[in-house]
Amino acid sequence: MLKAEQITVTFGGVRAVSDVSLAVPAGELLGLVGPNGSGKTTFLNAVCGIVPARGSLTVADRPVRLGRPNAACRAGIARVFQAPQTYGELSCLDNVLLSTSDRRLLGLTGAWPARPAMWKRERARWAFAMSALETVGLESCALEPASLLSYGQQRLLELARALAGSPSILLLDEPSAGLNDAETAALAALLGAVRAAGNTLVVVDHKIDFLDALCDRLVVLELGRVIASGPPDQVWRDDRVISAYLGVASDAEH
Amino acid sequence: MIRPPDYRRRHFPAIAAFVVLTAVIGPLLSTSRADQFLVDLWLVYSIAVLGFYLVFGLAGRFAFCQTFMMALGGYTSAWVTRDHSFLLGVVSAIVVTALAAGLVGFLIRKAQHFYFAMATFAVTQIGMTIVGQATSFTGPNGQATGIAPPSLFGHVFLQDADIFWLFLGVLTLCLILVAFIERSPLRREAVAARENGLVASLSGVGVQRVQLVLFMLGSAFGGVSGSLIGHWQGVISTDSFGTDLSIGIFLMLLLGGVDSIWGALIGAAVYVALPRLLSGIEHYSSIVYGVLLLVVVLAVPGGIAAAVRRLPRRFPRRFSRRVADAEG
Ligand SMILES: Nc1ncnc2c1ncn2[C@@H]1O[C@H](COP(=O)(O)OP(=O)(O)O)[C@@H](O)[C@H]1O
Ligand SMILES: [Mg+2]
């Protein structure tokens, strides 16, 4: 589904991500781990076009231009950020509606001359957005401003927005950060269900139990490079992974 | 079927109430020629500020060129009506200002915040100078004189009391057009583009397109306002649309409230009425505006419209629900 080849991101001489290549087949849930500062977030940023990057990217064998968020969106890449990026003054329903994949009659034509057609499309969009909110369990907050949600709920709202775009691949950055054990378990169940519904996911996380239970495969980054990749139990026995994590063992636990 | 909150607001009943109220109170307020002038001025400024609401309030683009758009609309309409009808003059003003804004907005589509403000300020300075020099287009010394009075379907609007109805009609039309936008997906896309363009574009929102469309539309509102001012007054010069008014437009929206269509109308009313209420101490009017602005910034950040909206919370529930329904 997603194929990234030799993705490199440099920040003023520092290579935050260097020559990272990975392929995520359709339907897989891939875990991306590594110590703090190893370039996980930057890699996700490069894939969704919000930092300039070199390399090549294809989704479903179609090339995606790097550095263009709109191109990434069109290719079916959706993203859930570590710090929730929701629009506080818009209702939860509006937040989800933003990512609708039916992008016709959203402008002046729909607002003025083609109102009946716009209403028809909007009704279908509302229903679809509501079903995305139901998937994450936020349907009762649909009309409330997103600013009233808790931190964990805002992340769920972002997940609903990402799902409502019917993406080909979903990137999540530390979705369990800031959640308690019960919330983390609920999130794991939710991601399992999302994946079972046929979605392809890349999940960055620090909670190892959380990832091990979910993932088919782990990719480990250190200093912007891939140092290991494979099934979780095999990866955690890898010497390079152990030494990469030894120095920062405390980081890995939260 | 669950509808998003923007579609639940009662924009059109509120607009109807506003129009009826203005139609009744407007003539009552206009007991003297000076007061009639101010009421008309309020209506015609409201159109320009409503346009600025689209550009700044909704799309979050601080355009400093609304008065230039007013001037461009005024001169274009004056030039066209030398040989053609009033209606064609207004339509030309709309087309020319929208195209001018489209060109400027496209060239500086990537400029953010302060840079966008500076670039539009520069456009205003350059544009005003060119307009002032293009005497065959404007008139001697950049002054267009003898502009034909508005006339529609054989009726010529000569008196200020007559003009009142024309301006109220145009303002109502503009309010309806804006309310249609408020009740459409364009509103949520504009808010998202304004609040976080990067995340919005990752969701598929055409951030630059949304902002450009609203900039063109808001500028066209400015063009209509300028055109109406020209035909009403019969004469316009570059001084009619000077820096005072540039800041005035900004002040009106900020005073009234940047986050609803009513802010533009309330702010314009305060701005126009203030000198009249302060007669005797006109010399201090800039101080009064300054103090008022500080009060708004410090005490009622959302402007007067937001303060009015918050008021009902202090009253019993039944009343508050009625008010919340009535306002847009
Ligand atoms: N915008 C930026 N400017 C400069 N350096 C950055 C920027 N973003 C990340 N970095 C650097 O890139 C490296 C990787 O960061 P990051 O991708 O956030 O790591 P991770 O998500 O794995 O913890 C770090 O050294 C960080 O300091
Ligand atoms: Mg990170």
Image (cartoon, coloured by chain):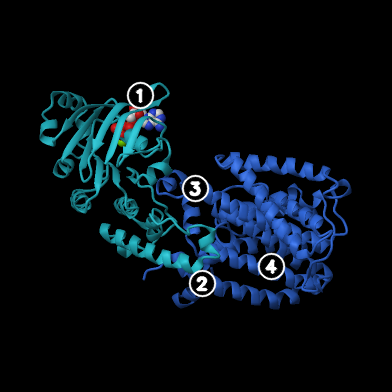
Chain colours: A cyan, B blue
Distance Cα–Cα, label 3 vs label 4? 30 Å
Same chain under badges 1 and 2? The reply is: no
Residue tagged 2: B10
Tag 2: residue type? Answer: Arg
B241, above or below B267, in the image: above
Distance Cα–Cα, label 4 vs label 2? 21 Å
Residue tagged 4: B170
Q: In which quarter of the image is the N terminus of chain B?
A: bottom left
Q: Position of residue B213 (x, y in %)?
A: 57, 52
Same chain under badges 3 and 2? The reply is: yes
Distance Cα–Cα, label 1 vs label 2? 54 Å
* Chain assignment, label 3: B
Left or right of B175? Residue A216 is: left
Tag 1: residue type? Answer: Arg
Residue tagged 1: A15
The earlier-in-sequence mark between 4 and 2 is 2
